[in-house]
Structure formats: C-alpha cells, structure tokens
Image (tube, rainbow, N blue to C red):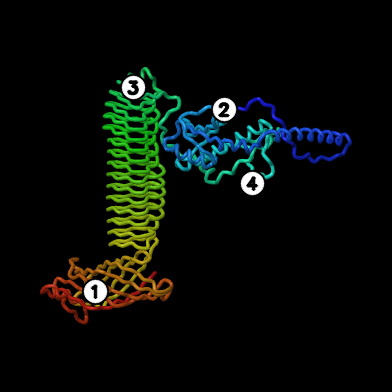
Amino acid sequence: MNTPDIALLPAPLRGSPRRERSTSARGAGLRAGVLLVRSLAAAGAFAAISAPPARVLAEAPSAVGVELVVDGAPWTLDPDAVRAAVGRELGASVTLASAATAGRPTLVVRGEPDGRITLSYSAADDRRIERTIDVPEDPDRAAEAIALLAGNLVRDEAAELAAAFGKRPRETTPPPQAQPEPAEPPAGAKAAPPRAARPAPSAQARRAARSAPPEPPRCELPGAKTVVLGADLFPFVGTSTVDGANVVRRYSLNLAGGYTAGITGLEVGVGVNIASSFVCGAQFSAGANLALGPARGVQISAGLNLARGLWGAQVGPINVTAGPVTGAQGGVLNIASGAVDGAQLGMVNVAAGASTDLQIGVANVAVSDATDVQVGLVNLGVGAATGVQVGLASVAAGKSTGAQVSLANLSAGESTGVQIGLVNVATGKVEGMQIGLVNYAGESPFSFGLLNVVRNGRLHLDVWGLESGIVMAGLKNGSDHFHNIYGIGIRMTGDRPRMVVSLGLGGRIPLGERVYADMDLLGYSLHEPSSINTSATLVQARAVLGVRLFPELAVFGGPSYNVAFGDTAEDARLSPYGSIPLGIGDSDAQRRWPGVVLGVQAF
C-alpha cells in the first residue's frame, strides 16, 4: 500500500510488563516510564477527540457509494453479479463504471495472464491498495470471493487511514472476532499495533478463495494490441508484419496462413489459422485451425482442429484438445487429454482426462477415473469407474462397472452391476445379474445362461435316479440362487442299455439352515452304445426338497413331469408304469407321464 510519510502518534499502552522490582534503580526507571506513558496517553486522547473514529472512516464508502470497474476479467465472470455481491458485502451503493473517476472510492477488478484476479481499491484521496487471489471457476463462487476481498480491502484501507492520522476505534463495543495481521513480524521485532477488526469470512468463502480449478479462456490479453481487422497471406506476412504478433483481432482473414495472439470474433482462412493465446469466437479453415491456448466457441475445419482447452465445439476430420473439453467434438478422430464434460462423436474417440461423459463411435477409448456412457462397436473403459457400455464388444478395466450390453462383455474390476450379452465375463463380483449364453463371474447372485461358471459360487456333486431306470452323476455349479447341471449316466432297464447325457438349469430357494428347495429344468439325451446315435430325448421339469444330513452331505427328492421324444414309439416308452401320447400329430413316439426323482448331494 502507498502510505504517505506522516509521523504516526504511538498508540496508548494498555499496561506494563510484569518485572521483579529487585533494585531501587529499576523502580525509578519504572516510575519515569509511567510518567512518559501518561503524557503520551493524554496526547492520544486529545487527537481522538478532535477527529472522527476509525469506524466513521470505514463507513465512508457507504455514504458516497463505490464505483466498480471490471477490466479484462475472465469471460465467465458476470460484472452485474460481482457488483451485487460487493454491494451486499459493503452495505453500500456500487455502480459499474468503464474507468475510475478521480475523487471517488473505486474498486478495479483486473484479470491476470495466469488466470488469477487482482482487485485494487482507490480511496477518495487517491490512496490505493490491491491484492491478487485465485478465484473458483463457478461464477457465483467467484463473485463471492471477490466481494469478500473487496470488503477486506475497503475496511483495511479505512483502518490504516485512521492509524495514519492517529485515530483509533471506540472501545466501548469491541468486535466479536478480531482478525490477526496476515504476515508475522520478523523475529525480535516489536509487534505492530492491532488494526481495526474485520468480519470473519464464511467457511464457504474461504474455500472459494483458496480453490483454483482450471479457468475457461479469457477473451482479453493484457498488454496485447486490439484491432478490428487483420489479414495475412502467410504467418507474419500481412498485417501481422506491421502490427506484430502480440495482437488480438476481432476479425481475421488469412490465405495460406495467418498468425495472431487472439481472436474475439471470427477468423476465416484457406490454409492454417494460428492463434497463439486464445480463441473466443469461431475459426473456419480448409486446412487447420490451431489455438495454442484455450478456445471458447467453435472450430470448423476440413483438416485439423487443435486447442489447448475447449469450451464449445470442434467439427472436422481430426479434432485434438490438449486439455479439458466442455462441449462436443465431432469428426473421424476425436482426442481429448483432459476431462470431457460433454460428448465425443466420431469414428474413433479417445479421452484421457479425469472424467468422460459420452462417447459415440465405432471405437471408444476412455482412460478416465469416471466414464459415464460409451456407445460403439468396440468400447474400452480404463479407470476407477465405468457407467454404461453398449456395443458389439465392451471392456471395462476399472474398479467398478455399471452396465454392459454387448455381444461380448468383459469387466475386469472388483464389482459389476449388469452384463447382458452372448458371452459375459466378470472377474470380480457381480452385484446385479448376468444374462447370456455363457456367463463367468468371480461371485454372482444371478447368472442366467446355458453355461454359467461362478468361481466362488456353489459347486455340488449330485447322484440321482429316475423312475424310468436312468441313473445319473453330475455337477451342479452356480450362484447363490441359480445353477447349471451337467450330468452323465446310463439307463439299464429296457431291452438294451443306453448311455445318457444331461444338461439343465435351475434355481434354489433356501428354506432354513439345513433345508432347501430346487426348481430345475433338464434335458436328457439317450444314445445307442454301439453307434452313439440318439434314440430318444427326455425333457424333465422337477421340484425337489433337499435336507442336509451332515455339513457336506444332503439327500433330495421330489416329483417330476416328463416328456419323451423317440425315433420309434418303443423308444419313447420310458415310463415303467405307462404313459400317454403327447397329442401332437398322429405320432405315438411322443409320450408324457409324471415321475419321481431321488438323489444324494455332496457339498
């Protein structure tokens, strides 16, 4: 702060240090000091009576109002929102102005090249103080942080003016929370007198002032020359030869190529458009649009679009953003090295930021902590969490996966919600379900398909027999409530023995610690031993009740209903107590009958 060379009157001392009075010399020195203090206190009291207290000076802006000048602030910052926030903080009338007015209290908000904000306060007598802070990306929080700083600057300035003229606030009603000096005094130095109290900022405002997320592009470049129109034949050949490279153009026309620091309107070129610092507007080119800084608006090219950060859209065969994308990329190849808060629409989409919202294309790759949706022929999500993948083949290699709907689904994380496809593979735990022809999971409550393998699921060895003389041995493997049955056996009754192979699926309902019920549907294929040809097929639905006799042994049994299809009527007559025709056509080789199942299960 610029402080005039004014001799400051020392503030009245509030007390004396506690010292031992061991000698008369020290006592005499103490009495002399007390007399000096009383003399200085009397002088300070006279000065305090002759001028208004510091609080009056602190409230001076309320009486005359404050002007607010916004100079080159980030484009997301709404000057009206800042004016309203500052007015609420100061409790004074705040007016937007294009430039500072001499003799009036003025606040100036200025954007810095590194994305921070500098706020300066000029009092009515042209005294000035300024601070530079980081502001959050959210406009409301940014306005709140600037208003908080404005209040501190105005109150600090009033307090320092009061101290400069030897005035101090009335002590009849001390403030509830006095803020310490921001900087510690050097070691061995005397502490400075306390300043006037400042209101304690809210926790939200402190967090807003400290946070510094990536800023969207600024539409002004401090120190750069601003022109309405620029034109180049080649980079640095054209108006850039006269104006130089540090120029911000409103409109830019280029032939083979053009170079400028920034665009705040429209740039059109046949070859290459180059903006070294920012683009706020639109770039159109048949060759390439290159924004070496952030771009706000749209880039459309028949070749390449490049930006360091994008707040808008890129449309062209190749779109590359070396930073975050807030908007959309549409083309053959879309690449974003930052978070995608929007969409990538193209043949091949690649995102490698903290998060990815939406990718639609032939091949989608997201190396992000959080990926929301991928829709394409091939989808690859590498990161902590993947939301939804829809396509022909979907692979999620993160910690958790929400849903995969594809012909082939692979989830290599700890947990998976839903997989629907012909082949589903989840190396971890399935929280929801798997529905497909072949399902594999580390753990699963519901895997429904022709072949289900659950690594940490149920596995039983079953031996069972039917009333038709078929004896089977097989494996039952599955999840908590669903399982598959694979068996092999023989039918010894009848005119000749026949080999039997079975395949089935079913569900389990626990009825207690030792009792359960299984509902199964099985198919049996009977083969001639000599030729392995199928002579009959048996379809069976059964409901069995199981009782666990020992921890690893149970018996089960229950009714069944059977339908047999044979090459001949004799091959279909598998029931020992008779059967009736199925009633489909005139064939007698289709028979049905009720039956019974008895078996043993080892755990």
Residue in front for this viewpoint, 220 or 100? 100
In three-dimensional space, the C-alpha distance between marks 1 and 4, rounded to whole angstroms, equals 95 Å
Instruction: State the image coordinates of residue 257 (x, y, percent, origin top left).
Output: 31, 24
Q: Is residue 188 in sight in this rendering?
A: no
Residue in front for this viewpoint, 116 or 126? 126
The residue lying furthest to the top in this view is: 242
For image coordinates 53% across by 43% down, the residue present is 205
Q: Which residue is mark 2?
A: 126
Amino acid type for the residue under numbered disc 1: Arg
Q: Is residue 459 above or below residue 194?
A: below
Q: Which residue is mark 3?
A: 235
Residue in front for this viewpoint, 196 or 562? 196
Q: Which mark is residue 176?
A: 4
Amino acid type for the residue under numbered disc 3: Pro
Question: SS of the residue at dot 3?
Answer: loop
User: Mark 4 or mark 2, which is nearer the start of the sequence?
Assistant: 2
Residue in front for this viewpoint, 502 or 86? 86
Instruction: State the image coordinates of residue 147 (x, y, percent, origin top left).
Output: 52, 39
Label 4: how many Cα within 10 Å (few below 14, some 14–19, many 20+)? few
Given contact means CB atoms under 8 Å apart, are the residues at marks 2 and 3 in contact?
Answer: no
408 on left or right of 554: left
Q: Nearer the viewer, mark 2 or mark 3?
A: 2
In three-dimensional space, the C-alpha distance between marks 3 and 1, rounded to whole angstroms, equals 89 Å
Question: SS of the residue at dot 4?
Answer: loop
Residue 491: name its quadrant.
Answer: bottom left
